[in-house]
Amino acid sequence: MNTQSQNKGANTGAEAYKSLLSLAFEYKKFFAWAVVGMVIFAVSDASFAYLIKPMLDDGFINRDPVMAVLVPLGIIGIFVVRMVAVFLRTYCMDYIGRQVINKLRTQLFDKLMTLKTEEYDHTSSALVVSKFSYDVEQVASAVSSSLTAVIQDSLRIIVLLSYMFWLSWELSAIFLLAGPLVFVIVVKLASRFRKVSKGIQQSVGFVTHIAQEVIEANRVVKIFGGTAYEQQKFSKANDNNLKQNLKLSVATAISTPLTQLIVAIAFAGIVAFATSDMMYGEITSGDFMSFIFAMTMLLAPMRSLSSINANIQRGIAAGESVFEFVALESEKDTGSKVLDKVSGDIKFESACLTYKNQKRNVLNNISFSAKQNQTVAIVGRSGSGKSSLANLLPRLYELSGGDILIDGHSIQDYSLESLRKNIAYVGQDIRLFNDTVRNNIAYGALNNCSEEDLQEAIEQSFAAEFIKELPKGLDTLVGEKGMLLSGGQRQRVAIARALLKNAPILILDEATSALDTESERYIQNALQQLMQSRTTLVIAHRLSTIEHADNIVVMDEGEIVEQGSHDTLISQQGHYARLHAIQFEDKDEL
């Protein structure tokens, strides 16, 4: 079992890095120039080592005046060439890394736009946000910095080793004995690095999640005395993040000095062998010092390769996280029917809904119809499935059974864009964007509306009065989630947005629940006028607001238990009558 799991993890890691490399290799021109820079940089290392031989043998021992001039000029020339190489390598690889980040973030955001609604229900928003920031940066590091180190340091090792073998194959062979031991260390630590890196990513997500919740629910935290509880929860998550990072630090701290120790032992063996009688007369002082200089320069890329493994594994783990999210199933958009405007006839035929990872249906055999311009109210106790039913019509959730027809055609036949173009929605949880009032009303496809249509929607939603009092009127920023507006004001902005859309089908999910009594009275009048020319589904908590509906559907535990007009349902003395009596008893007591 463990072996299979490890193999699966290894395959996933390899696939993730392969995907990352394929993204990087899309920019072949920049990658080619970067490699040119790396090759030049690697050759310059050997060139420095090569200058040691004539500097000692000809400059110091034989006192050749020509070498006294050529060697300094050679050093300057090598540095000039090296400078160009560093620029090529750094700019081109950074360009690739930034492009990969841009592409991954675009893929993540595109997935957010098409992701199934039920996936949002099971995914922490903070964990998703961390993919845009922490994860993609780790991926970029693996693609640019780490890939640069792997290629350039490998080239440096190859060039320097080749030069060392050219000087003395015997001494080089002794040095190479350390190679297999270093390789074993790198391989052993690779899986450890990746495992710990995944733990770090998860811990960062939890820290972000807790902080985000406290920011969004700060009033609840303060009023209900949750400060100590949230601090304890954050401290636990933060300590776990610290623990995971320290685990990575331990692994990194072990790998680098252990590699250096093995190389140092090889270095000691080389010095001992070079000064023995066996090597007497085989190499000059300049050869030996040039060899030692090359070997010393070789330690830096070897040390870099042994430590870069942690960054690569961190990038692979981040890549797995990003690619797993991108691979999540998007909304199915297989319908081909496109209509500019439907008539608005709606028919539910034994519609069923099952949420992800649940065996029991949330909705069972829902059947009712709404003719063009009719109003159908959906009522029931909290948790009876009213909002779930409303979410089926615009296909925010997919049917698990039955069908829903609009103008006689299954909603599966319509393209998602065409279907949703014909539906306006005002929910109980109003979401405004951190933008102006104008842009929140004329949102998305509505941004090309005329000023006349915009003002008409504002007037009908009774939002004109409070908008005029705002500092910049329609151009006033509403703040994050519209927090600079009151609950009633946010609700009216949302209603204005629905009015401006002028869709033939309207869904009101307890759309007046956040309004005070006076505001609700005004808006109910506006909504009544709006419903006269639209097919409307009203999810209602206050039964007094839907007494004039053409049909009232009463739900309980995901099923329709009654339906009919207000008077008919009252006369039946069933579920609706009991709900109605309870609400009006409470009202009388008040």
Image: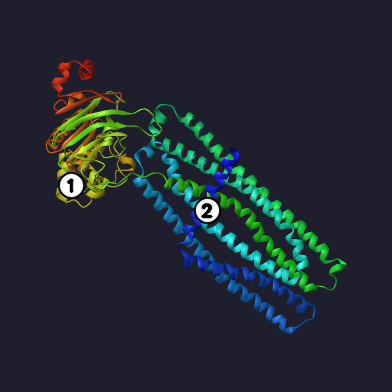
* Residue at image mark 2: 17
Residue placed at 44% from the left, 59% from the top? 99
Q: Is residue 84 visible?
A: yes
Question: Label 2: how many residues lie within 10 Å, few (<14), some (14-19) or many (20+)?
Answer: many
Quarter of the image with the N terminus in it? top right
Residue at the bottom extreme, as displayed? 66
Q: Is residue 289 left or right of residue 135?
A: right
Residue toward you, 579 or 371 = 371
Q: Is residue 472 visible?
A: no
**Quarter occupied by residue 509:** top left
Label 1 residue SS: helix
Residue toward you, 5 or 501 = 5
Which mark is nearer the camera, 2 or 1? Answer: 2
Classify 259 as above or below 577.
below
Question: How far apart, in angstroms, are the residues tagged by discs 2 and 1?
Answer: 50 Å
Whether pointer 2 and pointer 1 mark residues with C-beta atoms closer than 8 Å, the reply is no
* Residue at image mark 1: 454
Q: Which numbered disc flags the more N-terminal residue, 2 or 1?
A: 2
Quarter of the image with the C terminus in it? top left
Q: Give the residue type that dot 2 points to.
A: Tyr
Classify 106 as above or below 362.
below
| Colour setting | rainbow
Residue placed at 64% from the left, 54% from the top? 306
Residue 75 percent location from the top left of the image: 65, 75
Residue at the right extreme, as displayed? 277
Residue 315 percent location from the top left of the image: 53, 51
**Quarter occupied by residue 540:** top left
Q: Give the residue type that dot 1 points to.
A: Leu
Residue placed at 16% from the left, 51% from the top? 450
Residue 18 percent location from the top left of the image: 51, 55
Residue toward you, 399 or 73 = 399
Residue 267 percent location from the top left of the image: 76, 60
